Image (cartoon, rainbow, N blue to C red):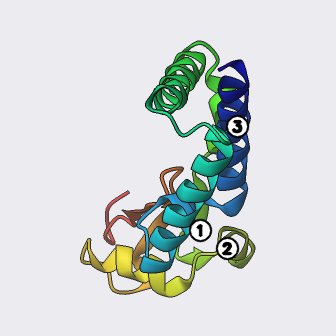
Amino acid sequence: MIDIIFRTAIAWLGLTILLRLSGRRTLGEMSAVDLVVLLITGDMIQQSLLGDDASLTSGFVVIITLLTLTMAYAKAKAVWPGAARHFEGVPTVLIRNGKPDERQMANSRVAMDEILEAARLQGITEPEEIRFALLEVSGQISIIPRAPAGRA
């Protein structure tokens, strides 16, 4: 059972790091391709966690280990907020005062169409109307509109 706990902890850490490296958009709204990758990943990791032991007890050991790691991570984030920045990142500015930051957009793999879609949901039709477009750590795009002319 110790080897299952160890493999589960290593898999949790490894998958957490891989998802972080794959970018925040992976964690936002999932496409059909993202869902297929997630399902296949889950199946492949399950096989490596349990090894030859597919018993119900081993399955519960994996689940309990994952829940324990998740609760420990949540507690660690509360105690050391700076640690969360390393695992989860910080919001990324994609547009500032109507000007797209092409480098940040490329690094985040976010297209202008995606930003404009988020803006349209708030009734904004032109990039010049955007004060800030932020890629949140959740993968969502937040739009902060510019103040109308005559307002600060």
**Residue 122 in the image: above or below residue 76:** below
The residue under the point 52% across, 62% down is: 38
The secondary element bearing badge 2 is classed as loop
- The residue indicated by pointer 3 is 13
Residue that appears at 65% across and 24% down: 5
Q: Nearer the viewer, mark 2 or mark 3?
A: 3
Q: Are marks 1 and 2 in contact (CB under 8 Å)?
A: yes
Residue that carries the numbered disc 2 in the rendered image? 101
Residue 60 lies, with reference to residue 85, above or below; the image says above
The residue that disc 1 covers is: 94
Q: Nearer the viewer, residue 97 or 4?
A: 4
Q: Residues within 10 Å of mark 3 (few under 14, many from 20)?
A: few
Query: Compared to 10, does 38 lie above or below?
Result: below
Q: Which mark is residue 111?
A: none
In front of the other: 127 or 30: 30
Classify 74 as above or below 103.
above
Of the two numbered discs 3 and 1 in the rendering, the one whose residue sits closer to the viewer? 3
Q: Amino acid at mark 2?
A: Asp
Check the picture and name the quadrant holding the N terminus: top right
Amino acid under disc 1: Leu
Where residue 45 sits: x, y (%)? 63, 51
**Disc 1: CA contacts within 10 A as few (<14), some (14-19) or many (>=20):** many
* Labels 3 and 1: the sequence-earlier one: 3
Q: Position of residue 120 (x, y in %)?
A: 30, 80
Which type of secondary structure does the marked residue at label 1 adopt? strand
- Alpha carbon separation for disc pair 2 and 3: 32 Å
**Are dots 3 and 1 in contact, CB under 8 Å?**
no
Q: Quadrant of residue 77?
A: top right
Spot occupied by residue 123 in the image (x, y as percentages of width and height)? 24, 77
